[in-house]
Image (cartoon, helix red, strand yellow):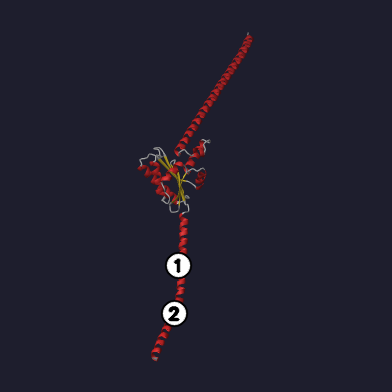
Amino acid sequence: MENKFRSTFDKIYAEEELKEKTADFLSKEIRRRKPAGRIFRQRLIGACAAFAVFLFISGLSYFTPNAYVDMDVNPSISLTLNRYGRVLEAAPYNDDGAVILRDVDVRHKSWDQAVERLLDEMILRGYLAPDGLVSVTVQAGGNDREQKMLGEIRESVDTLLDSHHSTASADIYAVTREVRDCAHDYNLSPAKYLAITQLQEVDPGASYEQCAEHSISEIKQLTEEHCGEHHEENGEHHEESGEDAEDENNTEEINDTEAVNDTEAADNGDEKHHSGKKDHHGHEKHEDSE
């Protein structure tokens, strides 16, 4: 009986001892693994922070305007691009441009796709006349990228016009930031702003506000008409000046002729006078000889 009790107590003691050893082991293991877990968490936090910074910089870069493409067929539209050539914003300059953009969404499209889709829509809606003009300007800082964009736009526009069997012409060129800023002051595309500026050189009465709703083709035609009138006025003035000069020359010739006649008459009078004197002297000499 005593041995049984002792055996039972030994088991209880053994179990308690095992529990203590197990608890000590687990405590040591937790303490040992804590630094590793802390380092892992720190590394994870650092990686997340770096990724967040990357996303912020990428997002900032994506949504930062880097270049501008302005289209004018009379629907006038401005495209703002990022450094990746994607359209951040498409804004109309006039009501016709707003109609086009209402049905054609080009945001986040590549700029060449945007230009092609917008021009295609303008042609389909009948905005481009057979003798019309497609004006596209690029403002990208005057670098190699700008020249590359100009070349690609020319090729794209020419291809699209051919596909529609259009005989319209295209005018594609680069503008400076100053020109674009001045155009925006009047809510005009750079191409239309420059066309009106040229018109003002021959017609000072033309204003940006009055010409805003005219197409660039119409503005250029007005400029040519005023240039023709100016040349005609200069021609008439030249003819009048020529006639005045001819009258002056004729007057001078008449005066010269009269002067010559007067001189000849005076010379003839002198000759007669001298002849009279000789006759008189001859007569006297004749009397002396008698």
- Crowding at dot 2, Cα within 10 Å, few <14 / some 14-19 / many 20+, comes out as few
> Which residue was labeled with disc 1?
44
User: Of all residues shown, which one is farthest toward the front?
Assistant: 1
> Which residue was labeled with disc 2?
23
The residue at 46%/64% (across/down) is 48
Q: Amino acid at mark 1?
A: Leu
Callout in the foreground (2, 1): 2
The residue at 40%/87% (across/down) is 8
Q: Which mark is residue 208?
A: none
User: Camera-side residue: 218 or 271?
Assistant: 218
Q: Amino acid at mark 2?
A: Ala
- Residue 191 at x, y percent in the picture: 47, 42
- Residue 36 at x, y percent in the picture: 45, 73
Point out the tag, 2 or 1, that comes first from the N-terminus. 2
The answer, for residue 151, to whether it is visible in the render is: no
Residue 278 lies in quadrant: top right
- Residue 98 at x, y percent in the picture: 45, 44
Secondary structure of residue under mark 1: helix
126 vs 281, left or right, is left
Q: Quadrant of the C terminus?
A: top right
User: Camera-side residue: 38 or 57?
Assistant: 38
- Residue 5 at x, y percent in the picture: 40, 89
Say above or below: 83 vs 132.
below
Q: How many circles with numbers are drawn on the protein? A: 2
Q: CA distance from mark 2 to mark 1?
A: 30 Å
- Crowding at dot 1, Cα within 10 Å, few <14 / some 14-19 / many 20+, comes out as few
